Image (cartoon, helix red, strand yellow):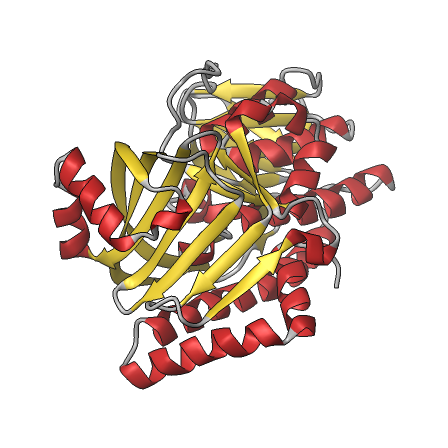
């Protein structure tokens, strides 16, 4: 505790590592505290992991700005240029084409572990960042000019800013006494990696059914990631099927035009819950990513929201630092909360609406399907929705 750091980031996942990289390359002294070990190298030929995220253009730009995008091999990322959403019968739909916005693509699907590995490779190049692995915070003491953070290995750190990026079950959030509002949707999502008959197209496809959404997300080559929402009972029963029975169930439900399913390569399921912190900041402390909010994953915006947190917090903290001020300044943190909380609440409201409309009573489902068809014809509205989803200025 001889030195007071500019910032301590708790949590070395994708969002926490992005904050550490942004602050570190701006010349700040940063400690990244991670409960596990550093991410392992991933051979190019390794099977695709089940945990895959959609990176929109704003997220890609942040990864480029912090120097991590160059560490993501082209063979482990898949661009998507078309987005399709439809009702159960696929009669009403909305389609987006990147060319309509004069964009090369809408973003990329990338495995979470590949993104995290790329960020940690970048951190190794930044001299101002120190990584402390296999360590967790056990006490946080705020102060007038710095915070103290005690780790479970006995070390005591001091910093002008502490950032909680340690996930949905954030211990940092608990130490700061920040409550959450939670909701369990009573659903599970089954994630299935498959090998397809045809090379994957550049289409992100989603269908809304009364039981929950179904999605097919492209991966490089003849691979795809399927996401299948349903009740907990139905999902667990489907997860227990053998590979061939699950493959046949997929072929029955998912359109053959998306590439067909040759083999099931892996599967896992998780419950669908929402969690939102009642506040994002305390004196000398800020929450980002899943520590601040976990939204319904049907639009795949969870990581993008977290990386937008990382960008907004880093921008304000760096501005204060470069102006010779305090990176943990109350005004900078309050500005971050004012910027991000309304945007997250808007996304939560949108996901709630989609969920309740498409899984609700028949009149609601009909209205939702009609809304898709109407939105397809409103080109101006389509462009605004897409630019918002991509994190681009309107």
Q: How many marks?
A: 0
As drawn, 390 above or below 372: above
**Quarter-of-image position of residue 183:** bottom left
Looking at the image, which is closer to me, 317 or 156? Answer: 317
Instruction: Work out which quarter of the rendered image holds the N terminus and state it.
Output: top right
Left or right of residue 168, residue 63 in this image: right
As drawn, 289 above or below 193: below
Residue in the picture at 74% in, 29% down: 28
Locate residue 286, reporting x and y percent.
Answer: 58, 48
Looking at the image, which is closer to me, 10 or 183? Answer: 183
Q: Residue furthest bottom?
A: 363
Residue in the picture at 74% in, 45% down: 315
Looking at the image, which is closer to me, 385 or 334? Answer: 385
**Quarter-of-image position of residue 264:** top left
Instruction: Work out which quarter of the rendered image holds the C terminus and state it.
Output: bottom right
Residue in the picture at 27% in, 69% down: 210
Left or right of residue 112, residue 213 in this image: left
As drawn, 118 above or below 232: above
Looking at the image, which is closer to me, 313 or 68? Answer: 68
Left or right of residue 92, residue 329 in this image: right
Q: Residue furthest right?
A: 323
Q: Is residue 275 visible?
A: no
Q: Is residue 36 visible?
A: yes
Residue in the picture at 35% in, 72% down: 358
Locate residue 125, reporting x and y percent.
Answer: 68, 16
Locate residue 150, reporting x and y percent.
Answer: 48, 30
As drawn, 200 above or below 152: below
Locate residue 185, reporting x and y percent.
Answer: 29, 63
């Amino acid at each position: 505790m001889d030195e007071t750091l500019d910032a301590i980031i708790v949590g070395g996942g994708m969002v926490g590592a992005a904050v550490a990289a942004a602050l570190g390359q701006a010349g700040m002294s940063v400690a990244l505290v991670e409960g596990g070990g550093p991410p392992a190298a991933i051979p190019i030929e390794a099977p695709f992991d089940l945990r895959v995220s959609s990176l929109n253009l704003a997220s890609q730009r942040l990864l480029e700005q912090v120097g991590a995008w160059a560490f993501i091999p082209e063979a482990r990322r898949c661009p998507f240029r078309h987005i399709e959403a439809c009702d159960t019968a696929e009669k009403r739909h909305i389609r987006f084409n990147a060319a309509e916005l004069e964009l090369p693509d809408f973003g990329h699907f990338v495995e979470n572990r590949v993104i995290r590995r790329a960020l940690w490779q970048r951190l190794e190049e930044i001299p101002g960042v120190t990584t402390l692995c296999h360590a967790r915070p056990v006490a946080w003491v705020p102060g007038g000019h710095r915070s103290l953070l005690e780790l479970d290995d006995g070390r005591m750190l001091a910093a002008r800013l502490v950032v909680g990026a340690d996930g949905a079950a954030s211990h940092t959030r608990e130490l700061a006494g920040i409550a959450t509002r939670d909701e369990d949707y009573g659903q599970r999502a089954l994630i299935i990696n498959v090998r397809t008959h045809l090379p994957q197209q550049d289409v992100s496809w989603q269908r809304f059914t009364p039981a929950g959404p179904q999605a097919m997300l492209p991966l490089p080559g003849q691979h795809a990631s399927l996401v299948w929402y349903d009740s907990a009972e139905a999902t667990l029963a489907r997860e227990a099927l053998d590979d061939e029975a699950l493959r046949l169930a997929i072929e029955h439900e998912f359109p053959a035009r998306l590439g067909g399913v040759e083999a099931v390569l892996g599967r896992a399921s998780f419950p669908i819950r929402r969690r939102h912190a009642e506040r994002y900041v305390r004196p000398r402390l800020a929450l980002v990513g899943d520590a601040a909010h976990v939204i319904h994953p049907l639009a795949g915006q969870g990581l993008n929201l977290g990386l937008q947190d990382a960008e907004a917090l880093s921008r304000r903290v760096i501005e204060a630092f470069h102006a010779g001020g305090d990176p943990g300044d109350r005004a900078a943190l309050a500005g971050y909360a004012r910027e991000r909380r309304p945007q997250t609440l808007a996304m939560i409201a949108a996901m709630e609406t989609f969920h309740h409309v498409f899984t609700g009573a028949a009149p609601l489902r009909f209205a939702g399907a009609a809304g898709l068809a109407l939105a397809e014809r409103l080109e101006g509205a389509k462009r605004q929705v897409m630019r918002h989803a991509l994190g681009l200025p309107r």
